[in-house]
Every structure is written in C-alpha cells, then in structure tokens.
Amino acid sequence: MYKFHNKIKRVDWFYENYAKTDDFLIDEFLKRVNESYYYNSAKLYSSRYIDDIQEAYSSMKEELKIEDTKNNYNVVNIGAGTGFDYNILKNLNIQYDSYFFIEPSKDMIKEFLSRHNDNDDKKVVIKNNHFHEVLDDLRNKNNKFIFINSVLHHVIYIEKFLDDIKSIMNPNDILVIGHEPNNSYNPLMFFLNLTFKAIFTSALLKKAPFLKVFYDNEVKSNERWEKINTQLLDEGVIIKKMSPLTIRRIIDYGVGHKKDWKRLNIPKDYNEGFIDVHDISKYLGNEYKRKFYITYRHFGDSNGNVVIESLNNIFKSILKNHGTNFLSVWKKF
C-alpha cells in the first residue's frame, strides 16, 4: 500500500547521500539527473518490443468502443516521449480535434521529430514543458482523452501529479494510464519470472563481466551510466558516482515489483511504498469510475524471445491480474 503524503521519501535519501546539497536544492538535483539520463538514453527508447503493449491498447479500444464517440477527442499526452504514444493512437485510428504533445525533454522531442514527418498533422501541438506548466491551456477543453503511457512510475510527487490531472478533468473526460509496473505483482510469479528468465534467456549471461562484451546493447548501456556519472560530477551536481541501479531507481522511481530497490538499503522511514492501480482509484475518489483494467507481461518483457512470449500469452488468460504491467482507464462522471 502506498503511503500518500509521507513526510520523507526515498528521493530524500538519494538527495542526502549523493547530491552536492550546498549548491543544489532537491528539485534542481532531480532535474539535472533526469536531463543527463535522457540526453544519454533517448535513442535507446526507439527500439523495444511493443507487440503486447499494442495488444493491450487494442483490447481497451474494443471493450470501451472508444471509436464510437460522437465527438472527436482532445488528446492530452503527458510525457509524450519520442512518439510511442502518438503511434499507438494513430494505429488505433482514434480521432482527435487536438493533440497536446507534452514532453519536458528537448532530446526526446528532437528524437520524435527526427522520426515523424507530421507536417500534415496540424492538430499536434508540441509543448516542451512539464505538465503542471500547461494546466491553464487544458482546463477548458472538453471530451479530453488524457493519455499517460509509461510515465507515472517516473513521477516522484504522486499526490501533486494526480491533483493536477483531477484539476483539468471535466465530466465524461477519460484518463488512460498505461504500461505501468504492477506493484501488486504476485511473489510466486516473481519467482517463476526469474526462474524462466534464467533458463530461457541470456539474462544471467549478460551479468557476467567476461561475457558482457558480446552483447552490444549491454556495452552501450554500461557506457551510458559512465557518461551520466561523468557529466554530473563535472557539473558538481553529485559528490560521488551513482550505481546504475541508483540512477535507475531515481528515473524509474515507482518501479517496485522488481524488488531490486532493496539492494540500496534505503531506511524504512524513507520508503513511501509503490503505488498500484487500487491506490490510484482510491486517490481519484468517487467521481471517477474505473472502466477498464488489464495486466500483461506475466514473465516480463519477452524482447521477442519466443518462449517468454508464449508463456506471457498463456498466463494472461490464466492469471489475468498478475502481469508485471497494467493498463487502466477511468472516466469522470
């Protein structure tokens, strides 16, 4: 269960242990870490296994009959990234009158523009801002389709973020939160996940120092962590190097189902927990009804591995609520 309004959070521990606190406040520390991470990682987001994600969204569209709406949507895409979400809606043929592409990272937007020729799509409005900076542009829009894909687990101050979302939602607006970690992931499934990954994938081999050199993506990933640390040390943002896991748990702040955060030995008082779909529903309140919920990737990201992909397909029918990722839709009444 997530502890809303916890006085201290994991992020405070990261800040106290790694930041040059005399020169940088916590918000600036987080901004610099995020900027360095996405500058060195943006291109890595252009290639990943997405078939199961698209299938989940197709199920959402079919069950909710989203295309049958009488009026086109005003899409609010928060954390639009390099355009993955944009492509999802295009593939689903969801019609819109406006598409607010909200993304704070210039590097992500640059990557999006390099791969999309959207001169014909005059409905797209790119906002190189944080979400809270554009609220006034969105409040008076009706029939909103608020689309948040693979974003919530990056948000540290969940309460403020959800409050901002509620502040722009009008009756009949839709909130879609997708490809988020299922932090209620079953411990038995977690054990089976690790077991099957060890047997049927190269996950363990990639961790062996003398074999890493044979995996190009692993080499690029290792170089990325070194570049991030070097940049932050040169800029005087941090006082010592951060491990890849530390950086990852600052960036992917809300990922709890992997349990790897425990290796960081964060004191209990600093741990506010990890939010799940039930926590979100509770915080949104009675005006919001959950209309759709699905989980997938019961054995994690298959990355095209046939065995893991087959297991994922089998178990999504057997244990529907026990995948590693979820997609959920709420409607305001």
Image (spheres, rainbow, N blue to C red):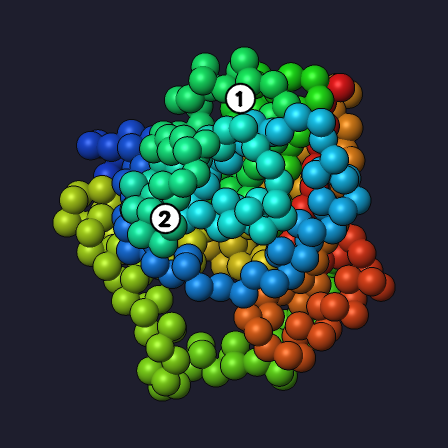
Residue at image point 40% right, 40% down: 120
Circle 2 packing at 10 Å, graded few (<14), some (14-19), many (20+), is few
**Would residue 266 be visible to someone looking at this image?**
no
Give the secondary structure at mark 1: helix
- Is 183 rendered above or below residue 198? above
State the image coordinates of residue 43 (x, y, percent, origin top left): 34, 58
Would residue 66 be visible to someone looking at this image?
yes
Q: Residue at x 54, y 13 (%)?
A: 140
Q: Which residue is mark 2?
A: 117
Marks 1 and 2, the one that precedes in the sequence: 2
Q: Which residue is mark 1?
A: 164
- Pair 1/2: label in front: 2
x then y, percent, for residue 82? 41, 49
The residue closer to the viewer here, 167 or 30, is 167
Which quadrant of the figure contains the C terminus?
top right
Q: Is residue 74 found left or right of 116 in the rendered image?
A: right
Under mark 2, the amino acid is: Asn
Q: Which mark is residue 181?
A: none
Q: Secondary structure at mark 2?
A: loop
Is label 1 in contact with label 2 (beta carbons under 8 Å)? Answer: no
Q: Quadrant of residue 316?
A: bottom right
> Vertically, is 131 above or below 107?
above
Residue lying at the far left of the rendered structure: 234
Rendering coords of residue 54 (x, y %): 62, 56
Give how far apart the Cα atoms at labels 1 and 2 are.
31 Å
Q: 154 above or below 7?
A: below
Q: Please state which amino acid type lies under the numbered disc 1.
A: Asp
The crowd level at tag 1 (other Cα within 10 Å; few <14, some 14-19, many 20+) is some
Image quadrant holding the N terminus, namely top right
> In the image, 296: left or right of 41?
right
